[in-house]
Every structure is written in structure tokens, then in C-alpha cells.
């Protein structure tokens, strides 16, 4: 059964999602199996921890804010990275997400020597932890109104101003979702 969730989609938290781990987040789905569950990374939660403090060999290759992003509430002591490469093929140390929406974006093997990818990297971002859902859990949350499912764009993964990503992704959807992008952080102050 197709649940509509697939690699390369964004999960955009609806204003009703009050869980502090996910409030106003934009999550990129990086793995999905309807029978096995879903794994994603939060794209708009930079920390104040510089990458060079956690992964010094990779620090000079990071683009955008040079900080580790909080990828989600699971396994915060583990890091993963996403990188965008030009051209074709899968060089050692990189596995493409295999989706048109975020073409040439993939997961980086952070145990590999950075020199394997350094010459090919266009963009790189490091995440501490990830977001995970068991089989059927995310579908249930979508049905309950916690998430919007929208197509990703390659620029979303490496947004220059992650603090604006939630609003920008919703705004470009048009219609009702563009209206939701103006929803105040605290509606009681409206």
C-alpha cells in the first residue's frame, strides 16, 4: 500500500504540532519503507556547536552556517551528514537519496576520509541525531494533522537562513499553505 510518504519529501510541521522536538520544523525524509519505518533529518535547527568541535576533519568542507544541526531527537550523540555533488555516479563515501526532488543530494559516510569527497562537494551539512518513526507511525501523524507532506527542493537542505525555512517552504506551496506560513508562533499574542 502506498502511504504517500517517500524519500525526498518534506514533512512540514503544522501549527497544531506542539511537540517541542518538532514545532515549526521542516524534516527531509531520507529513508522510508512502509513496512519498516521512516528516517528523516530536521533541516532548520542549527545548534551553536561548531562542526570543528565535533568533526574537525569535515569542518572546512561544511557550507552555510558552520554549525552542527539538530537532526532530530533520536541518537543525538551520533552524527550524519548530507552533501550535494555535481555530475553522475556515486563516489566512495556518498550514497545518493535517489529522488528527483533533491537531485544529487545524499548521505555521507563520516567515517570515510574527507579527501574522498572534498574535490566533488558542492554543499555539506552535518546533523546530530535524526527523526525516526516506526512502521505506520508517521502515516498516523499525517492523518491526525501533525504534518504537511510537500515536495523538497535541493536548496531546502542547505538553506542559507534555516530560521526562515518553515515559512518559505509553506509560502511557495500557494493556497492555504501559503496562508499558514503567516501563522504566528504564539497565536494568543495575535
Image (tube, helix red, strand yellow):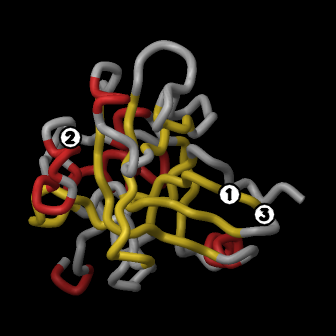
Kindly check if marks 3 and 1 are in contact, taking CB atoms under 8 A apart as contact: yes
- Up-down relation of residue 53 to residue 160 (above or below): below
Foreground mark, 2 or 3? 2
Residue pushed farthest top? 87
Q: Which mark is residue 142?
A: none
Q: Where is residue 12 in the image (x, y as percent from the top left)?
A: 46, 60
**Residue for badge 1:** 32
Residue positioned 36% across, 79% down in the render: 21
Q: Mark 3 points at which residue?
A: 34
First of labels 2, 3 by sequence position: 3
Q: Are discs 1 and 2 less than 8 Å apart at CB?
A: no
The residue to which callout 2 is attached is 62
Does any portion of residue 187 appear in the rendered image?
yes
Q: Which residue is drawn at 29% across and 52% down?
A: 126
In the image, residue 61 lies at what x, y percent? 20, 36
Using the image, determine if residue 187 lies above or below residue 178: below
Q: In this view, does 7 lie above or below 123?
A: below
Mark 1 surroundings within 10 Å by alpha-carbon count, few (fewer than 14), some (14 through 19), many (20 or more): some
Q: Position of residue 13 (x, y in %)?
A: 44, 67
Q: How far apart are marks 2 and 3 (CA)?
A: 32 Å
**Does residue 34 appear to the left or right of 108 in the view shown?**
right
Q: Is residue 134 above or below residue 54?
A: below
Residue drawn at (53%, 75%) of the image: 146
Disc 1, SS: strand
Q: In the structure shown, which secondary structural element does the residue marked by tag 2 occupy?
A: loop
Q: Position of residue 131 (x, y in %)?
A: 48, 70
- Nearest to viewer (mark 1 / mark 2): 2
* Quarter of the view holding residue 116: top left
The image quarter in which residue 179 lies: bottom left
Amino acid at each position: 500500500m502506498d502511504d504517500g510518504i517517500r524519500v525526498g519529501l518534506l514533512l512540514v510541521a503544522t501549527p497544531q504540532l506542539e511537540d517541542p522536538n518538532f514545532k515549526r520544523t521542516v524534516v527531509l525524509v531520507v529513508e522510508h519503507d512502509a513496512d519498516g519505518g521512516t528516517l528523516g533529518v530536521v533541516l532548520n535547527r542549527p545548534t551553536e556547536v561548531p562542526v570543528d568541535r565535533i568533526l574537525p576533519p569535515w569542518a572546512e568542507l561544511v557550507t552555510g552556517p558552520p554549525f552542527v544541526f539538530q537532526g532530530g531527537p533520536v541518537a543525538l550523540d551520533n552524527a550524519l551528514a548530507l552533501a550535494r555533488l555535481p555530475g553522475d555516479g556515486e563516489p566512495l563515501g556518498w550514497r545518493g537519496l535517489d529522488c528527483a526532488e533533491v537531485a544529487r543530494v545524499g548521505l555521507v559516510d563520516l567515517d570515510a576520509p574527507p579527501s574522498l569527497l572534498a574535490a566533488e562537494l558542492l554543499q555539506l551539512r552535518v546533523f546530530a541525531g535524526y527523526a525516526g518513526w516506526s512502521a505506520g507511525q508517521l502515516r498516523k501523524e499525517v492523518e491526525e494533522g501533525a504534518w504537511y507532506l510537500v515536495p523538497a527542493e535541493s536548496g531546502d537542505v542547505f538553506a542559507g537562513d534555516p530560521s526562515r525555512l518553515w515559512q518559505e517552504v509553506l509560502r511557495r506551496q500557494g493556497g492555504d499553505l501559503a496562508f499558514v506560513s503567516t501563522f504566528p508562533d504564539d497565536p494568543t499574542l495575535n
